[in-house]
Image (spheres, rainbow, N blue to C red):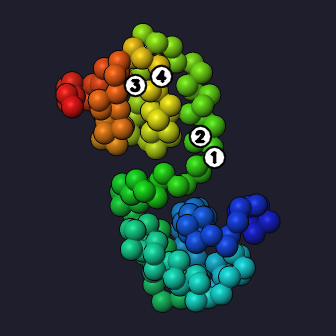
Amino acid sequence: MSASDTTTDRGRPAQRQAEIAEYVLQHGSVSATELAELFHVSLMTIHRDLDELERQGVVRKFRGGVSAQPSSVFESNVSYRLRASRQEKLALARRARELIEPGMAVMLDDSTSTLELARLLHDAAPLTVITNFLETIKLLSGVRGIRLLSLGGEYFA
């Protein structure tokens, strides 16, 4: 990824932070100066972004730079995962939804890509959804016509 590879509005902190996090994950570690140059912002802005990403548990700051947190910490951060590659996830979810018909049973894993799909299932009833993702369970609990099964058993709202 380079500055010319993205066309998003880097002026928006949340979007810029998501791109910074992806860049750090791809490269393992990077200097704050390199990030400031790449994202065309001041070093102070980068430090504020890195402080926020560290607070979220996505990265670990060290003197002059930042590194990715271990995978287990990063992967558990649903709020970050929801923002990462959002347009791609939405496109995948829309395409997958076209394949789902009433009466089917679908299994959704604990990815945020399938969470985007779950948001589109309200009109697919009757439907059985099997998942191990609490966020999906919370989203679909109480939706009329959707039978919800978690890997530990049936979920009753």
Measured Cα–Cα span from mark 3 to mark 1 = 22 Å
Asked whether residue 20 appears in the rendered view, the answer is no
Estimate the x, y position of residue 19 in percent, counting from the top left: 61, 64
Vertically, is 119 above or below 61?
above
As shown in the figure, which amino acid type bears the numbered disc 2? Leu
As shown in the figure, which amino acid type bears the numbered disc 4? Asp
Residue named by callout 3: 107
Q: Quadrant of residue 41?
A: bottom right
Q: Residue at x 39, y 57 (%)?
A: 77
Estimate the x, y position of residue 29 in percent, counting from the top left: 54, 73
Q: Residue at x 57, y 26 (%)?
A: 96
Judged from the image, the secondary structure of the residue bearing numbered disc 1 is helix
Judged from the image, the secondary structure of the residue bearing numbered disc 3 is strand
The residue sitting at the right extreme is: 4
Q: Are marks 2 and 1 in contact (CB under 8 Å)?
A: yes
Closer to the observer: label 3 or label 1?
1
Residue named by callout 4: 123
Closer to the observer: label 2 or label 4?
4
Judged from the image, the secondary structure of the residue bearing numbered disc 2 is helix
Mark found first going from the N terminus, 2 or 4: 2
Measured Cα–Cα span from mark 2 to mark 1 = 5 Å
Residue named by callout 2: 90
Disc 1 packing (10 Å; few <14; some 14–19; many ≥20): few
